[in-house]
Structure formats: C-alpha cells, structure tokens
Amino acid sequence: MAPLFRLLPDMLESFLSLLTDVSFWLIVLLVGLMYKKMGRTSRRLFQISAEPVWRVTAVSALFGLAGGALGSVLLVLAGISLQEIGISYLWVTALLLMLIEQRFLCFAYAGGLLSLSHLILGFPAISVPQLMGLVAILHMIEALLIYGSGHLEPIPVYIRIQSGQIVGGFNLQKFWPLPLIAMSAWNIADPGVLTDSVQLPYSWWPLIKSELALAGGFIVYKLMPVVAALGYGDIAVSAAPREKTRTASWELACYSMILLLLSVAASYLPILAILPALFGPLGHEMLIRLGQRREMHRQPLFVPPERGVMILHVLRGSPSYKAGLRTSDVLLSVDHTPVNDEMEIMQALLAQGERVELEYLTGKEKKRKTTIVKRAFGQMLGFIPVPGESSTNYLEIATSASFAEKWLRKIRKRFGR
C-alpha cells in the first residue's frame, strides 16, 4: 500500500484545488440550467412550482463531490493513465455516435468502438485495458450515484405508453459535476527529473498495467486533476422511483465490475483485450434492452384504482404533505364525501373550511387511515393525482432520438423533398 499512502496527501490537495477551478463551477452552473429546464416541464403539465433549482443543484453537487472522491481513489488504484486512453478520440467518437442516437452519447459505446478499431486496424494508438477500465470505473461511480440520489426529487409526468393508455410516472433525470484525480504515465530514462511522481514497478499496483512498460525505461505516474460530469435518465412507470433506481444501480454496478475485471485481465494477457472491447458496448446495450423489456411486461403502477383517487405526487410543504399523504396513497373521501376523480375532490373542497378530514388507503397493505388537513381558505390540498380518462396533457416516450434524422427532415422540408 506504500505508493498509495504516499499519494494520498497529494490527491487530497489536488482534489481540493478543483473546488476553486472555474471549469468545475461552470459544470455546476450547467447542471443548474438543466434542472431549471426540467422544472419547466412540471409547470407546463401541472401549473405547479418545481423544487428550487438551487437546492437540487446543491444536492447534486454534494453527491458529485462524494462520487468524485471515491472515483479518484478507484482511478488511482486501477492506474488509469490519461496518456493511453486517447481522450480526444473518445469524445469525438461519442459526439458522432450521438448524431445517430442520443443515448449513444456514452463512453461504453465510444470506448468499445475505438477499442475494436485499435485491435482490428491498429488505429488509434490506445491501450484497450486502460480505456475500457476508465469506462468501467465511470459507470461504477454512476451506479453509486444512482443508488444514492437517483430517486431524489423525481418529476411527476403523465405518459402515454405503447398501448395508448395515459398513466402516471416519474421522470428521473440527474446530473452530477464530478471532480476527479486521474493519473498520467510517463516512460523516461531518469525518474529523478520529475517531482511529485511515483515510480514503478510494484508487484500489485497499478491493477491495470501500463503498456508503456513494453518500451523499457522507467515508468512514473503523476496526478492529473480533471473535471467531468455524469448524467442519468430514466422513466419510472411500473415501479416507484426508489425501486427503479435501486434495480438500475445494482445492474450497472455488476456490469461495471465485470468490465473492470476483464480490463485488468487484458492488461496481463493482451490476447484477452477483445473481451472488454466487446463487453463494454454489448453489455451496456443489454442493460438498456433488459430495462425496456421489464417496463413493457409489467403493469403500470400509477393508474386509477377501482375506487378513490390515487396520488401520484405530493408537493413538499403542501397541506397534504404536512398531513402525511404520500405517493401511491389512495384518497377515498373528503369530509365523508366519496371521491373518484379530481373534479369530485374540487367540488367537495368548495363546501369545506380550513380543516378537512380525509380518508385514504396507504402502504403496501393499503391500510385505511384518516387525517385532518389544515389549509388556508380556498387552498387546494397540494397533490397531483394519477391521470384520468379525460387527461390531455401528457408526454410520449420516444423510442429513438437522432439529431442527424432531425436535421435531414428539416433539410428535406426546406428544399421540398
């Protein structure tokens, strides 16, 4: 453990220096703008105020800092060298793939494509174990962030599914600014010319061996602070947000661990490099298809019950929230007046004062409870019900989103073809 213990003080210093880096705060600002844009969806669909942008941005930044700290340890432990992954090729390939379909803006696809190109054509000059090891660690960080915060502040939406039915659901969109400490490997004749570096070889570290060792000489590693960002997007229709993100995070963590093990093995046995190159994109695609299939074969969760009105989302700080109502509860009556849709709730409230007695079902066992809601005169209860048959505001899930296709349609339309 000696080399890592030597690096810990320098890693901490470099990590803290990123907090004063302009690029880090620019990414935080970009994350805030993304959350602000998402908040407009809630206002457009339900005429409600979304959670304050500063709060969701601050939470994402805190989780990003924690993820960045852990990710830095993993990157250094693995010995990922920015010199050997072809970062410029990686970004260009990812952006080009995004033109085909937006979800391809992922290093799993770009890294796999570059790795296969290197193995088959010899171009670009990259280390497949190093590149796919980076992909594995970034997805491992993402899995942990999804598990810890992917379910927080979900955005309620009405969605039209493939059957044509309009159901309730949640848009799970998260963005995290990620300060990271990576490594840069150098092959030099005299390691004494570099300061603040760690010299190899060590029997166990790094886990992914640098291919620079093949050229002889001394290999030294220097710390490289970088700023990145991670994002997660999903729709919860057949499961609650917490259940949805928990499943997604565990599956992604398993994928990441397998990919990392394949990358480590390939660094010792180059003949195995084809395994992480193929598993990276194919395994990631399998995760997406598995999630889509699961959604298609499971019944929507947020649909009207046989009796009463199911609650899709309760606004934080509203009378209903203070009274203890939560998502999936079923409201049965307002001051002993049975209700079965949103209009009946509004009509029942018109005849009531500041204290309203609600009867509802809650929990998995749907236990019957009553509560007293205190509200200002004329104030609504502050929750969003699942959509009824007359709902007109909804979103549609796009099976594909291609920038290139959109541009081609615009060009054809402009030139009348």
Image (cartoon, rainbow, N blue to C red):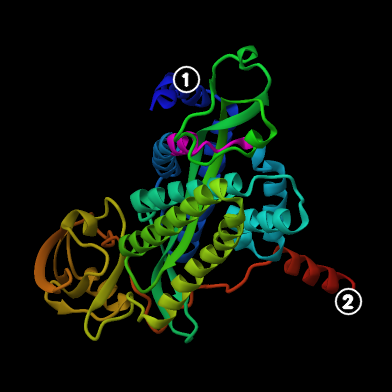
Amino acid found under the numbered disc labelled 1: Asp
Q: Nearer the viewer, residue 35 or 91?
A: 91
**Residue behind mark 1:** 10
Q: State the image coordinates of residue 370 (x, y, percent, origin top left).
A: 9, 67
**Residue 388 or residue 213, whichever sits in front:** 213
Q: Is residue 89 left or right of residue 174?
A: right
Name the foreground residue: 26 vs 208. 208
Classify the position of the C terminus by image quarter.
Answer: bottom right
Q: Quadrant of residue 1?
A: top left
> How far across and how far down the image is residue 204, in percent?
44, 35
Q: Position of residue 15 (x, y in %)?
A: 48, 26
Q: Is residue 74 magenta?
A: yes
Name the residue carrying label 2.
Answer: 416
Query: CA gap, disc 1 to disc 2?
Result: 61 Å
Residue in front for this viewpoint, 346 or 408? 408
> Is residue 289 placed above or below 88 in the rendered structure?
below
Position of residue 99 in the picture relative to residue 206 (left or right): right
Camera-nearest label, 1 or 2 = 1
**Residue 383 in view (yes/no):** no
Question: Does the magenta portion include 106?
Answer: no
Residue segment shown in magenta:
71-82
